[in-house]
């Protein structure tokens, strides 16, 4: 089993292909525990450079999205990078991000070591901080592999990266970097369309803007709400959401017709502080935002709560909601129809239609039969506004071309179903 996992983890494309044929895929996490969302202290990482070997090899975390809490020089060009969380207890999503370079070209070995965690994310590398590739499997070694295919127990205790460096920085990150500034660039690009506008709806705890995208062809009072990136490391969910929104805002006849009947509202980056500070999970209030949709102790969730309330009071009817996330494998978390009744059936019809168009990838579904306490976004959306909603999760290692395809297909099938049903 350990040998199987080692191959699967190191070769993410093979893992993706193999799991599509399994009879039983990822079954999802257990019930969401009730936790306090009152603000807790957060340890901000020290930012700077580490110099080694008579100041010829350098490490740095001086960029947005970085996470590097310490570096040790072991011996013979071998280094240990220490990664710790913003606070505890915390979900095991050990994000890392740093630069490394040398005055003279050489090969080094870097061990990733974590505080109370294991090595979850397969490294991405870049030479410019914008274009990232998955590191070659020959450069990546697992140390003390885990057991199974999913979950933190399946991950290796440590991981080692073999890297050729020179005098230009190489970025090493857990996933591609999509910081608040890069997301803003995407927002600005999409907003060049005449039927797309953007507005700042509030601020995060550290004062970063909470951007709203509105896609509107005919001032329709029927609306969708799409959110993403409550948890900083969950980049694959963001990438699928990005494709999803680009399809809804696209030039197809289907999209043009859809926008005449439905308005799409999108908060693409729910946790800008956590993203830019390189957090594993939490905002700068030390809280998992997707546990704060009942108490609303954090400013980021309050922004969306207040937006929904104001729109609803002005006559907007929200007919669908989606919250994009990432986890160990692609999975849908809808509310069971025993809770939502016929109104929520469209969510399951949507899942089925996506699966029919993308049969190569197994569809995992875990429906919740518990609505209260709301805590998570999906439950709040339905409890307050009778909005059929889903937590849409993409796998950490799902191939990026498939993420784009899935986001597009999901948008196309949702447009088709909503237009057919003409939800009243």
Image: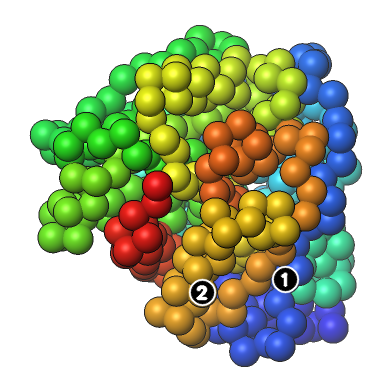
* Numbered disc in front, either 2 or 1: 2
- Which residue is pictured at 38% across the width and 30% down the height? 316
The mark that comes first in sequence, 2 or 1, is 1
Q: Is residue 5 above or below residue 263?
A: below
Its colouring scheme is: rainbow
Do the numbered discs 2 and 1 sit on residues whose CB atoms are within 8 Å?
A: no
Residue 254 horizontal/vertical position (percent): 19, 61
The residue to which callout 1 is attached is: 26
Residue 234 horizontal/vertical position (percent): 58, 47
Splitting the image into 4 quarters, where does residue 294 fall?
top right
Question: In the rendered view of the protein, which quadrant contains the N terminus?
Answer: bottom right
The residue to which callout 2 is attached is: 352
Q: Residues within 10 Å of mark 1 (few under 14, many from 20)?
A: many
Viewer-closest of 81 and 280:
280
* Relative to 105, 77 lies left or right: right
Q: CA distance from mark 2 to mark 1?
A: 17 Å
- Which residue is pictured at 71% across the width and 88% down the height? 23
């Amino acid at each position: 089993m350990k040998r199987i996992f080692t191959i699967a983890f190191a070769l993410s494309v093979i893992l993706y292909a193999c799991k599509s044929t399994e009879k039983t895929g990822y079954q999802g996490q257990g019930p969401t525990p009730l936790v306090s969302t009152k603000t807790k202290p957060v340890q901000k990482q020290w930012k700077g450079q580490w110099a080694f070997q008579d100041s010829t090899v350098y490490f740095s975390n001086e960029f947005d999205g970085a996470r590097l809490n310490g570096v040790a020089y072991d011996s013979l060009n071998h280094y240990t990078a220490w990664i710790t969380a913003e606070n505890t207890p915390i979900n095991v999503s050990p994000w890392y991000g740093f630069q490394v370079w040398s005055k003279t070209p050489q090969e080094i070995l870097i061990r990733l070591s974590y505080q109370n965690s294991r090595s979850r994310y397969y490294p991405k590398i870049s030479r410019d901080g914008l274009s990232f590739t998955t590191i070659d499997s020959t450069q990546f070694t697992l140390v003390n592999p885990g057991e199974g295919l999913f979950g933190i127990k399946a991950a290796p205790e440590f991981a080692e990266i073999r890297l050729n460096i020179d005098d230009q920085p190489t970025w090493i990150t857990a996933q591609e970097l999509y910081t608040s500034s890069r997301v803003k660039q995407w927002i600005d690009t999409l907003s060049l369309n005449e039927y797309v506008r953007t507005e700042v709806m509030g601020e995060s705890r550290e004062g970063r803007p909470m951007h709203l995208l509105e896609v509107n062809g005919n001032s329709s009072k029927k609306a969708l709400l799409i959110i993403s990136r409550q948890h900083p490391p969950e980049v694959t969910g963001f990438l699928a959401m990005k494709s999803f929104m680009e399809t809804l805002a696209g030039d197809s006849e289907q999209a043009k017709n859809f926008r005449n009947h439905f308005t799409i509202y999108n908060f693409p980056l729910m946790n800008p502080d956590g993203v830019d500070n390189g957090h594993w999970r939490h905002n700068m209030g030390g809280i998992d935002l997707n546990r704060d949709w009942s108490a609303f102790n954090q400013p980021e969730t309050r922004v969306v709560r207040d937006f929904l309330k104001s729109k609803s009071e002005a006559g907007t009817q929200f007919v669908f909601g989606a919250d994009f996330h990432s986890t160990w494998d692609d999975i849908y978390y809808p509310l069971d129809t025993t809770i939502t009744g016929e109104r929520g059936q469209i969510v399951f019809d949507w899942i089925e239609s996506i699966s029919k168009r993308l049969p190569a990838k197994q569809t995992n579904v875990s429906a919740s039969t518990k609505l209260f306490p709301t805590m998570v976004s999906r439950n709040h959306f339905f409890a307050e506004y009778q909005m059929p909603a889903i937590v849409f999760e993409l796998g950490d290692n799902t191939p990026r071309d498939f993420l784009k395809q899935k986001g597009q297909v999901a948008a196309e099938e949702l447009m088709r179903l909503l237009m057919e049903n003409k939800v009243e």
